[in-house]
Amino acid sequence: MTAALILMGGKGARFGSPVPKQFHNIFGKQIYLHTLDRFAESGLFDAILLVCHPLWMERVERDLKEYPHPVHLVAGGKTRQESSFLGLEACPAFTEYVLIHDAVRPFVSEEILRNNVEGVKKHLATDTCIPSTDTLVFSSDLKKISSIPDRSLYLRGQTPQSFSYPLILEAHQKSKREAATDDCTLVMDLGKEIYLIAGDESNMKITTEMDLSLAEQLFFRWKTKRRHPCASLKGKTIALAGGTGGIGEAIKERLLLEGARPLILSRRSAPYGADLSSYSQAESLFERIAREEGPLDALVNCFGLFHLKALEDCSFQEISAIIDVNLKGVIYACKLARIKPGGHIINFASSSYSRGRKGYCIYSATKAGVVNFTQGLSEERPELLINAVAPQRTDTSMRQEFFPEEDPLDRLSPDAVAQEIIALLKETKVTGSVIDIRKNSPTH
């Protein structure tokens, strides 16, 4: 019998949040549940045990009531070493091998899991490791460099760490260490050899807020690679607000190729023309769509207004127009559109949402507002899949007009952005996320 022991005893001290990192969401699901999915869906384990800090047991018990795979919940201890030992003691009778893994490493691949299962049966103890890409520095006093070792001889440890069950249980029972942060250390104290399993850079441990941001992007790319090609948009009715511009036109063409029915919404479009920055016009428009088309399968808001002008040079009318179109218009559309349960809302942000840019700080502020609005709305409307996308600079007529000095080769094509939108519309679980779209995105 092979068991998986997943440790999530952390209290979130380094994460800077009152809620431990394992409970934060990536793509609409808590991190530790993504990790459980990797183990449960692999089919490699006879038992999965989740070791949880006692303070969070009640919350996890509620989560696991709705989890589709059997998981045994174990109360952890004050340290990682104690939690690991308590988990080992809770393993089923006749357990022969155990893989110990961090709950905040949700990107562990099936290949890594399989190699660990096969490796531990041969060697009795294995550790997942990757090479170090940074220069290593040794300092005996933490003030000056004592030596610079050959980094090719040093690896970075990940998890899983895998063991013969009797061996790791003995190592814990005989250990004289306190608060060991690594199970391999205890096995080495017995004089046993531990063999290496190749890890992967993507098998990252989410420890800081920056890690969480990186994890969202990594998860989208990982999900895209695993996406089933049979997903279909054929016959879907999708409102495309702003479908007359470069990106909107490209999305429309891609939707038609998929067999979908795009409804183009803009000031100039027919039959569904309206100024979405006007609440009354937006309300009338979406009431008409509901009468004539029924509830939508998706709403894509890809409209926007841009001015390249310093704030001191902007008139009141220009400031109001940017805010009305880029933020209020998106909010109105999301409020008024009637969308089927399980349907999508995709709101266009911009790569400038994360940091304001000189010459268009108002535009950047509205796009940051779109991101925060989208994230909050996804929690208010859990029956929908609501995400924001942030394309890097794209080769549209607007971009060409305002930034003629840019090299077109450095820009995304509108069709590349459209492909990412199609991929997201085929998702069935992703929500509450901000997806950066770059030239090296996996769908193009």
Image (cartoon, rainbow, N blue to C red):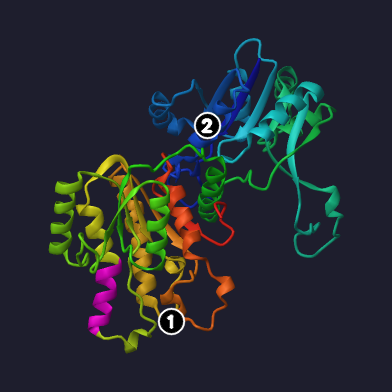
Mark 1, residue position: 401
Choose top left, top right, bottom left or bottom right for residue 330: bottom left
Query: Would residue 24 appear left or right of 381 to someone viewing this image?
Result: right
What range of the chain is rendered magenta? 316-326
Q: CA distance from mark 2 to mark 1?
A: 47 Å
| x and y percentages locating residue 398 in the rendered image | 41, 76
Front residue of 243 and 402: 243
Q: Residue at x 52, y 31 (%)?
A: 37
Q: Is residue 349 visible?
A: no
Q: Is residue 278 visible?
A: yes
| x and y percentages locating residue 115 in the rendered image | 73, 30
Q: Amino acid at mark 1?
A: Glu
Q: Residue at x 74, y 41 (%)?
A: 129
Tell me the number on the disc at residue 30: none
Membership of 325 in magenta stretch: yes
Mark 2, residue position: 37
Image quarter of the C terminus: bottom right
Membership of 198 in magenta stretch: no
> Is residue 126 depicted above or below 356 in this figure?
above
